[in-house]
Image (tube, rainbow, N blue to C red):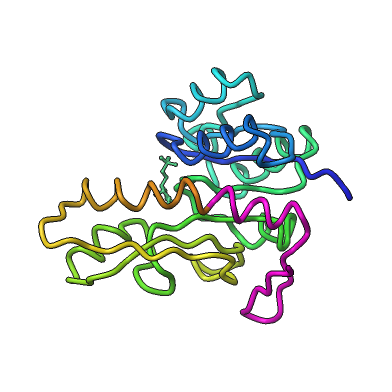
Amino acid sequence: MKKEILGILCSGNGSNLQAILDAIQRGELETTVGIVLSDNPKAVALQRAQKAGVPYVCVNRKSYATREAFEAALLKELQAHKVTVVILAGFMRILSGQFVQAYRNKILNLHPSLLPSFVGAHAYQDALAYGAKVTGCTVHFVDENLDAGPIILQKAVPIHEDDTPETLIARIHEQEHLLFPKAIALLLADKLRIEGRRVHILP
Ligand code: GRF
């Protein structure tokens, strides 16, 4: 089987990056991290990559006048590191069709809600404010539309009476750290088949 090379894109803390690096370290994910990339020079994710001894680079969004130029720089880095699979682990930029086209069905995103509920950048705060009793997390393929690509795995997380945004996201993160490596493992094992909106998981 072809060995995939991951490009992991982050903007912030990178706790999900850490979960992926740890899973690789434990031998649960047989893959190589080609590059960890952040649009934000202050992202803790970059420090995590450095500590783990994997290549990392900041492509600062502020250095580029347009989204096209920024994405061209991202693609250049990914290609320079021979990346075959792109993992969006808390990457807070919306990618254009041009980017999606370059890695069609090879981009995975993690979202902190049970999609299609609560799309967008405030998913867990929105679920709490809405009064939902259950939310969760979703790993999905990325297509041209926001938080809309075919769903690979989901995990429900209860919302408790006394939850604050902080306690809720902590509970969601626990599940995300398990779910994302699991979904990546399925992709690496070539067990995912997309049929329209449905992703079939081979045994
Ligand atoms: C996660 O909650 C993920 O669902 C969302 O961004 C957050 C990233 O957290 N897309 P971290 O940077 O991995 O800690």
Residue lying at the far bottom in this picture: please name it: 196
Looking at the picture, does residue 174 appear above or below residue 104?
A: above
Choose top left, top right, bottom left or bottom right for residue 15.
top left
Residue lying at the far right in this picture: please name it: 1
The structure residue drawn at horizontal position 57% and vertical position 41%, both measured from the top left corner, is 9
Q: Position of residue 83 (x, y in %)?
A: 75, 41
Looking at the picture, does residue 43 appear above or below residue 47?
A: below
Choose top left, top right, bottom left or bottom right for residue 122.
bottom left
Q: Is residue 137 left or right of residue 53?
A: left
Membership of 141 in magenta stretch: no
Q: Position of residue 85 (x, y in %)?
A: 71, 48
Nearer to me, 116 or 61: 116
User: Tag count in the figure?
Assistant: 0
The quarter of the picture where the C terminus appears is: bottom right
Nearer to me, 141 or 160: 160
Q: Position of residue 8 (x, y in %)?
A: 61, 40
Q: Position of residue 124 (x, y in %)?
A: 29, 58
Residue lying at the far left in this picture: please name it: 162
Q: Is residue 130 left or right of residue 81?
A: left
The structure residue drawn at horizontal position 43% and vertical position 27%, both measured from the top left corner, is 44
The structure residue drawn at horizontal position 53% and vertical position 41%, both measured from the top left corner, is 65
The structure residue drawn at horizontal position 60% and vertical position 62%, both measured from the top left corner, is 142
Q: What residue span does the magenta drawing correspond to?
A: 180-203
